[in-house]
């Protein structure tokens, strides 16, 4: 896993530079996640090599997630079903 800092605007860019960050540096896993007790959770939005993207059904959606813990080495795969009408009833947002 690799990443780069990507400021959203000039103010963020300046704050990162002022705090000593190199905006051209490619960050590795060791830069992004350090320590002996780290949790990582990811849910696929679009289908990729590791996770399937969100699949919509007439009455809901299915998501594919992975959860990992460094201390124990545990890796969990989760396929979740989401009832959109239930989500709408307690969030007040329309899901379609």
Image (tube, rainbow, N blue to C red):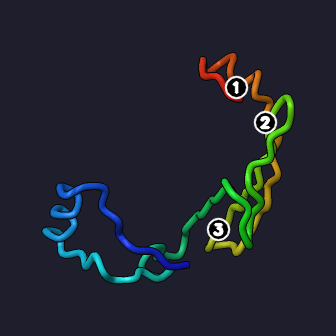
Name the one closer to the observer, 28 or 10. 10
**Left or right placement of residue 74 versus residue 16 in this view:** right
Q: Measured along the vertical axis of the image, is residue 93 above or below residue 4?
A: above
Q: Position of residue 51 (x, y in %)?
A: 74, 64
| Circle 2 Cα neighbour tier, 10 Å, few/some/many (<14 / 14–19 / ≥20) | some
Q: Secondary structure at mark 3?
A: strand
Q: Disc 3 marks which residue?
A: 69
Residue positioned 64% across, 22% down in the render = 94
Q: Secondary structure at mark 1?
A: helix
Q: Disc 1 marks which residue?
A: 87
Q: Disc 2 marks which residue?
A: 82
Q: Secondary structure at mark 2?
A: strand
The answer to whether the residue labelled 1 contacts the one labelled 2, judged by CB atoms less than 8 Å apart, is yes
Quadrant where the N terminus lies? Answer: bottom right
> Which image quadrant is residue 62 in?
top right
Residue positioned 79% across, 39% down in the render = 61
**Left or right placement of residue 29 versus residue 44 in this view:** left
Q: Position of residue 85 (x, y in %)?
A: 76, 22
Whole-number angstrom distance, CA of label 3 to CA of label 2: 25 Å
Marked residue nearer the N-terminal end (1 or 2): 2
Residue positioned 60% across, 17% down in the render = 92
Q: Measured along the vertical axis of the image, is residue 5 above or below residue 26?
A: above
């Amino acid at each position: 896993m690799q990443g780069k800092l990507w400021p959203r605007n000039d103010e963020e860019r300046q704050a990162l530079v002022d705090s000593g960050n190199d905006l051209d540096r490619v960050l590795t896993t060791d830069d992004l996640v350090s320590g002996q007790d780290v949790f990582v959770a990811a849910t696929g939005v679009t289908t990729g090599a590791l996770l399937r993207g969100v699949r919509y059904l007439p009455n809901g959606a299915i998501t594919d997630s992975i959860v990992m813990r460094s201390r124990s080495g545990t890796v969990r795969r989760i396929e979740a079903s989401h009832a959109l009408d239930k989500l709408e009833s307690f969030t007040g947002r329309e899901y379609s």
